[in-house]
Image (spheres, rainbow, N blue to C red):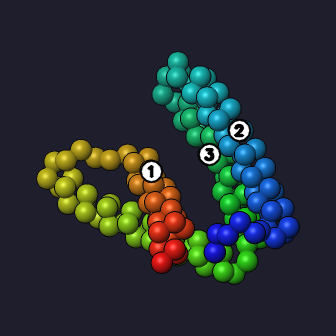
Amino acid sequence: MFNNEYSKKDKVNAKKYGNELGISIVIYMVVLFGSIYIAKPMENSLLRTLIVLTPTIPALGAFWAIIRHFQRMDEYMRVWLLEVIALAGGITAFFSFSYGFLEGMDYPKLSGFVIYVIFMGSWGLITLLRKYVLERE
C-alpha cells in the first residue's frame, strides 16, 4: 500500500494537496492570532463573538482542500483512508459515550477541543499501526 514507488499523478496530487492545505493553515493562523488580538480587550458582544468565530472561515478552506484530495485519490486509497476515519470515529464515540457516564458522577465537562484531539490522535495512531505493523504481517 505505502511503497516508495508513487506514480507521477500521485506525486502531483500530493503536491497540490500540500499547497492547498498549507495555504489554508497559514491563513488560518494569521486570522486566529488576529482575532484573538482584536477580540481579547473587547467586552462581550455580538461583534466580539463574530470576530472570535472568524478563524472558522479559513478552516473551511482546509476542509475543502481535504475534500479535493479525497476526490483525487484512487479507489483503494479512498477506501483505506475512510476505514481509518471510521475507526477513529468509533474510538472517539466510545470515549465520548463512556465519559458521559463519568460526567454524571461530577467529573469535569470536556471541551470540544479534547474530543477533536482524541479523534485526530486516534486517526494518526491507527494510520501508523496499519502502515507499519498490520500490513507487514
- Residue situated furthest front in the rendering: 137
Mark number, residue 26: 2
Secondary structure, mark 2, is helix
Amino acid at circle 3: Thr
Q: How many labels does the image show?
A: 3
- Choose the circle earlier in sequence order: 3 or 2: 2
Does residue 26 lie above or below 2 as drawn?
above
Q: Which mark is residue 117?
A: 1
Please tell me which residue lies in front, 53 or 66: 66
Q: Indicate the position of residue 51 as horizontal and vertical percent values.
A: 61, 33
Q: Write the residue at 19% across / 47% down.
A: 107
Pick whichever, 33 or 6, lies toward us. Answer: 6
The answer to which quarter of the image holds residue 9 is bottom right
Q: Name the residue under label 3.
A: 56
Residue drawn at (25%, 63%) of the image: 98
Q: Which of marks 1 and 3 is in front?
A: 1
Mark 1–mark 3 distance (CA, rounded to whole Å): 17 Å
> Looking at the image, can residue 123 be seen?
no
Label ID, residue 52: none
Relative side of 43 to 93, left or right? right
Q: How far apart are marks 3 and 2 (CA)?
A: 13 Å
Q: Could you tell me how far apart the alpha carbons at marks 1 and 2 are, in whole angstroms?
A: 20 Å
As displayed, is residue 30 above or below residue 43? below
Specify the quadrant that holds the N terminus.
bottom right
Image spot of residue 67 (x, y percent)? 69, 65
28 or 44, nearer to the observer: 28
Name the residue: 52% across, 18% down: 41
Question: Who comes first in sequence, dot 1 or dot 3?
Answer: 3
User: Residue 101's spot in the image, x, y percent?
Assistant: 20, 60
Name which residue type carries label 2: Val
Q: How crowded is mark 3: few (under 14 residues within 10 Å), some or many (20 or more)?
A: few
